[in-house]
Amino acid sequence: MTHDHDHDHAPITNGDEPPAAARAGALESLLVEKGVIRPETVRENVDWLVSRTSADGARLVARAWVDAEFKQRLLADARAAAVEVGLSPGPAPVLVAVENTERVHHLVVCTLCSCYPRGLLGPPPAWYKSLPYRSRAVADPRGVLEEFGVHVGDDVEVRVLDSTAEMRYLVLPRRPPGTERMTEEELTSLVTRDSMIGVAQPAAPATVG
Amino acid sequence: MHRPAHDRGGWPTDERIDRTEHELADWEVLTDALVGALGERGVMNVDELRRGIESMPPDEYERASYYERWLFAAETILTEKGILAPGELDRRLSA
Amino acid sequence: MTYAAGHRVRVADRTHVGHHRTPAYLKGRCGTVVRVHGAFPNPETRAYGDDGMPARRLYLVGFEHRDVWPGYGGRHTDRFYADIFEHWLEDAE
């Protein structure tokens, strides 16, 4: 994504953009003119936002898959574990990793808004922020999982985590079978964003080129 | 009990979840960055942002896109704090 | 009142005008404290420019489906969790 940032122009409107685009630009101009914010801060924030992907979360998961003691540290304090592997998990106050097992499958939602571990996963997908997901993830989690193509057996407990306060939840999905000979680096490519929200399983090894 | 429009858990709906991926538009990234900058400066915290979003009339809340809600909230809170004059953003847009 | 993991609690069923982070679908529901998170600034007052102090204790509370959704169609062992502030919890033991 390109992002030119010249602060000397009047708000630019463009027939293809929604009115909100001009509104955001005008708001920025006003706030900079008033000295409320600095353009450098806005630029830094833009750069941070566009640099965030789920690769950081995937690294944590892959490390936990190959190193059982690291996994315990991750489950005890996800922020400390992220820092340990050299990540910068961002401003979320508390990061909590929850482990899927053969008996338990977790699903994360924020029914009140869109709380999400952005520092580890990047921006949340549009569907995570959508009204039907926020409504149905708590009322009908198995139906939502089926809609996403995940079938959870009757012998598995579904646990829905509603992020109502300071905690940001990261699902530690189960390591796929047939991956015993893969390196940690190779394993990271199996860990999808959606598997760390709980609406997907990690990719199977044969699907990775 | 009256339930505000943002309090969505269990809200009756048959709507399917649209799983289309949407890359954020530049203006959406900008809005996010502006709100972050306001937070870093201590001008508007995340709870004020949420309060601003929650103050939207319900039908506007449901119609608005995610970052349109953020813009509404920022304008509401900044006007409340006297950082923006009422209508100042509209006047800038029509200038 | 302070709670420990394992304590049976009820989420207060009160009308709160203004910003708060207790979802309607959990108000009045009974659950069990799973984790004690520690104390955090109160978002209800931070939302109006206050510093949110004194910090309020926050708990991870777990709920059984039958205690939240009458007629739930999933498995009886399915669980719901939310982070609830102490001042929204009542002793249900």
Image (spheres, coloured by chain):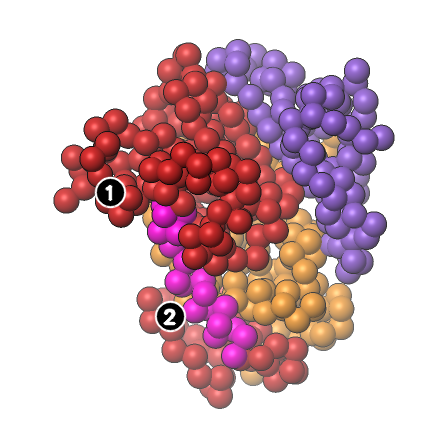
Chain colours: A red, B orange, C purple
The image quadrant of residue B83 is bottom right
Which quarter shows the N terminus of chain A?
A: bottom left
Front-most of residues A138 and A164:
A164
Q: Which mark is residue A15?
A: 2
Secondary structure found at label 2 = loop
Report the span colored magenta. Answer: A40-59
Mark 1 falls within which chain? A
Local crowd at mark 2 within 10 Å, few (<14), some, or many (≥20)?
Answer: few
Front-most of residues B93 and C15:
C15
Residue A28 rendering spot, x and y as whole percentages: 55, 75
Q: Which mark is residue A145?
A: none
Q: Which mark is residue A183?
A: 1
* Circle count: 2
Amino acid type, mark 1: Thr
Which residue is pictured at 42% across the width and 12% down the height?
A155
Secondary structure found at label 1 = loop
Residue C79 in view in this figure: yes
Q: Check the image and name the residue furthest to the bottom.
A: A8
The answer to whether B94 is drawn above or below residue A174 in the figure is below
Residue B4 in view in this figure: no
Mark 2 falls within which chain? A
